[in-house]
Structure formats: C-alpha cells, structure tokens
Amino acid sequence: MSQAGAAPGTTYDRVMLKISGEALMGDLGYGLHPPTVQRIAAEVKSVRDMGVEICMVIGGGNIFRGLAGSAQGMERTTADYMGMLATVMNALAMQSALESIGVFTRVISAIPMDQVCEPYIRRRAVRHLEKKRVCIFAAGTGNPYFTTDTAATLRANEMACQVIFKGTKVDGVYDKDPKKHADAKRYETVTYDEVLQKHLGVMDASAIALARDNNLPIIVFSLDEPGGFRGILNGQGTYTRVHG
C-alpha cells in the first residue's frame, strides 16, 4: 500500500526503527560489539539512500535494564533513569557508526545533556528529518516507568512516521517462542487487540495501545537478516504486520 509522497520505489517516506540494546551486543554477553553496530548502521544507510527519512530508538538492555535493577532491590525510579542513560550511550555509538559511513545523524535526548546531544524539541527534530538526517531519540520519554517501546511509539506519532519497524532476533510474531518450539506458527498479520489479548510480546501494552489509538502499523522483522530492512520497504522479505 503506497503512501502519498513516498520515496520512489518504497512504501513509506518516514519510518521509525526500534531496536533493542541487546541487538548491539552481537555474540557478547554485555555491552557493545562494534562490528554489529557498524552492520546495523550500514542497513540504516541503505534505507536512507532510498530517500526514506529515518527515526531510531534504541533500548539500553545491553548496558542496564531498569526493571532488572529494581528487581534486585534498587529503587525503581533511580533504576529507570540509569536505563535511560544507557540508551544515550547506545545512541552515541550508533551515531558514530553512521557518521563514519557518511550519514548525518542527530542524537536527541529527552533528558537534557547539551554537551553530548541535543534536547528534544519536536519542530527541530522534524527539520532534521526533512534535511535527511537520521534522528536517534535517546533517554526514552524522559520519565520512569515507561519503556523504550513506548518512547518509540510516542516519537513515531510526534514525527508523523507512517510505520514502526521493530527489529528483533526472529522474522516476525509467533504464537510461541520459535527457538524453543519447532511447531511455532508465524503470523502474517495480527491486530493490536490480538497482541494484547494473547500476550504476544511484540511491545509492551502501553506502546501497543498508543499505536492502536493512532492507527500506526508495526512491522516486526529480523534484524539479523542482511538487507531485511531495505527489502521490506521494497515489498519483499518475511515479517509480521500489526495493524487495526
């Protein structure tokens, strides 16, 4: 389904890419794996080169996860703020990788830290996108108790993105874990309400509800599939579409 004004040969002209912090670990158990960061940056560049405007939100679970810290006795609000700072570190790593291959990038933080990135100002962020810069939104929503899934959905709506691409380790949404169950069934399409009712784990409930209320589709695909991000924009590849 083509959108008015979409980039030539593609379905959309402005998209949100949401990836987990764990996606940047590669085969490491913790932290950043620079070759993996560089590979993802190359995927983003290939889509940017098609004329698509790209927003990104990256989680922080490879460095610190607020919920896990809270479970170990840390005060939840403090743990969540620590998790937000971890997302800024990941965003800076991705910015460095993108700019090393000639992609102009802005890291925009919900928590002001002017020495390392820009504060979030919606109109300025939109202008960056119009100038074909990749915008990486960091520090979540700036509030504890909200995940980066919710932050991605919020920013996607604010930036008037036409779709959220959720990059994962598997090529779509399954009725059960395909790594544990050989008979797991992949959905071609699934509704927001089915995701919530069946606890399919695409995103957290508040993110799904926000997407549903604004009729913002979510495409779940494998970030490990070379060329997968670009392929889907060209109408190819394997993925699950979450919609109304």
Image (spheres, grey):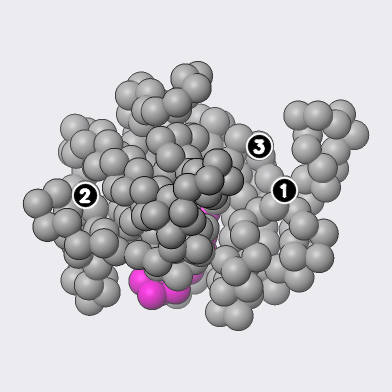
**Residue type marked 1:** Val
Quadrant showing the N terminus:
bottom right
Return the residue nearer the eye: 7 or 95: 95
The image quadrant that residue 40 belongs to is top left
* Residue topped by disc 1: 173
Does residue 137 appear to the left or right of 177 in the view shown? left
Secondary element under disc 1, as helix, strand or loop, is strand
Q: Residue at position x 45%, y 70% from top? A: 154
Does residue 99 appear to the left or right of 42 in the view shown? left
The image quadrant that residue 89 belongs to is top left
Q: How many numbered marks does the figure carry?
A: 3
**Residue type marked 2:** Thr
Give whichever of discs 2 and 3 has the lower sequence position.
2
Does residue 150 appear to the left or right of 140 in the view shown? right
Residue 133 counted in the magenta span: no
Q: CA distance from mark 1 to mark 3?
A: 8 Å
Give whichever of discs 1 and 2 has the lower sequence position.
2
Q: Residue at position x 37%, y 28% from top? A: 32
Image coordinates of residue 153 in percent, x first then y, are 49, 66
**Residue type marked 3:** Val
- Tell me whether circle 1 and circle 2 mark residues in contact (CB < 8 Å): no
Residue 67 sits above or below residue 228 on the image: below
* Residue topped by disc 2: 105
Magenta range? 157-165
* Furthest residue toward right: 183
* Residue topped by disc 3: 170
Residue 158 counted in the magenta span: yes
Q: Using a 10 Å C-alpha cutoff, classify the residue at mark 1 as few (fewer than 14 neighbours), some (14 to 19) or many (20 or more).
A: many
Q: Residue at position x 62%, y 57% from top? A: 203
Secondary element under disc 3, as helix, strand or loop, is loop
